[in-house]
């Protein structure tokens, strides 16, 4: 593990990024549903930064592209963390052929790969719902992988300067 992961991508920060970016997929419970143990999954970040924020970014990018008649073919998300923004932009732009996520944290890159390019069952994810270390819970669902991710998506574990 790099010193960046030790200083920046702590389990607590990973938990926050997963909650902010993916809580609608990972932790959402239908009305009346309960997690194992009879307790509802908490979703403590929804009131602060909802998962719709990356969707808003993607819709704004699409609006600007349409306004200037720009047809995007590739996208590079620098500092893409666990990948929710690239996920939403890919859904808004139908003609994207190449997607690149550049992220200096190896831990964040691993989660971006799991979330964006695989349909395998996800391992337990960290959930920050109390002071101290996160607890780990099984996700309720997962996002669908980006279509043809193996051909179209590149995840680069580097800083922008080194990429």
Image (tube, helix red, strand yellow):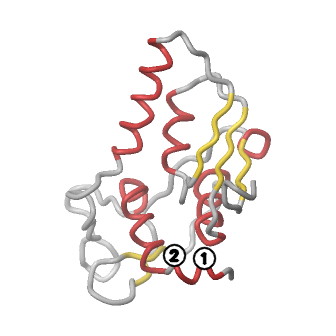
In the rendered structure, the answer to whether residue 156 lies left or right of residue 17 reads right
- Residue at the spot 24% in from the left edge and 71% down from the top edge: 40
Q: Between residues 122 and 126, which one lies in front from this camera angle?
A: 126
Q: CA distance from mark 1 to mark 2?
A: 5 Å
- Residue 4 location (% of width, % of height): 60, 76
Which residue is the extreme one toward the right?
Answer: 151
- Residue 156 location (% of width, % of height): 72, 56
Which residue is the extreme one toward the front?
Answer: 161
Answer above or below: position of 161 versus 64.
below
Question: In the rendered image, which residue does mark 2 sit on?
Answer: 8
Question: In the rendered image, which residue does mark 1 sit on?
Answer: 4
Q: Between residues 38 and 93, which one lies in front from this camera angle?
A: 93
The reply to whether callout 1 and callout 2 are in contact (CB within 8 Å) is: yes
Question: Residue 104's image quarter?
Answer: bottom right
- Residue 33 location (% of width, % of height): 26, 64
Instruction: Rate crowding at label 1 as few (under 14), some (14 to 19) or many (20 or more) other CA atoms within 10 Å.
Output: few
Q: Between residues 18 and 100, which one lies in front from this camera angle?
A: 100
- Residue at the spot 28% in from the left edge and 55% down from the top edge: 49
Location of the C terminus by quadrant is bottom right
Location of the N terminus by quadrant is bottom right
Q: SS class of the residue under badge 1?
A: helix
Instruction: Rate crowding at label 2 as few (under 14), some (14 to 19) or many (20 or more) other CA atoms within 10 Å.
Output: some
Which residue is the extreme one toward the bottom?
Answer: 132
Question: Residue 157's image quarter?
Answer: bottom right
Answer above or below: position of 27 versus 91.
below
- Residue 41 location (% of width, % of height): 29, 70
The tag on residue 31 is none
């Amino acid at each position: 593990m790099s010193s960046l992961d030790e200083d920046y991508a702590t389990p607590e920060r990973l938990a926050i990024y997963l909650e902010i970016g993916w809580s609608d997929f990972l932790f959402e419970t239908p009305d009346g549903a309960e997690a194992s143990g009879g307790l509802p999954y908490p979703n403590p970040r929804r009131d602060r930064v909802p998962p719709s924020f990356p969707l808003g970014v993607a819709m704004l990018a699409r609006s600007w592209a349409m306004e200037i008649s720009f047809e995007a073919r590739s996208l590079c998300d620098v500092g893409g963390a666990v990948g929710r923004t690239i996920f939403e932009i890919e859904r808004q732009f139908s003609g994207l052929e190449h997607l690149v996520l550049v992220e200096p944290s190896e831990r964040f890159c691993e989660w971006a790969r799991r979330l964006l390019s695989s349909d395998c069952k996800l391992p337990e994810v960290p959930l920050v719902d109390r002071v101290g270390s996160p607890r780990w819970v099984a996700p309720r669902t997962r996002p669908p992988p980006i279509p043809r991710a193996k051909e179209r998506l590149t995840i680069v574990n580097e800083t922008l300067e080194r990429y």
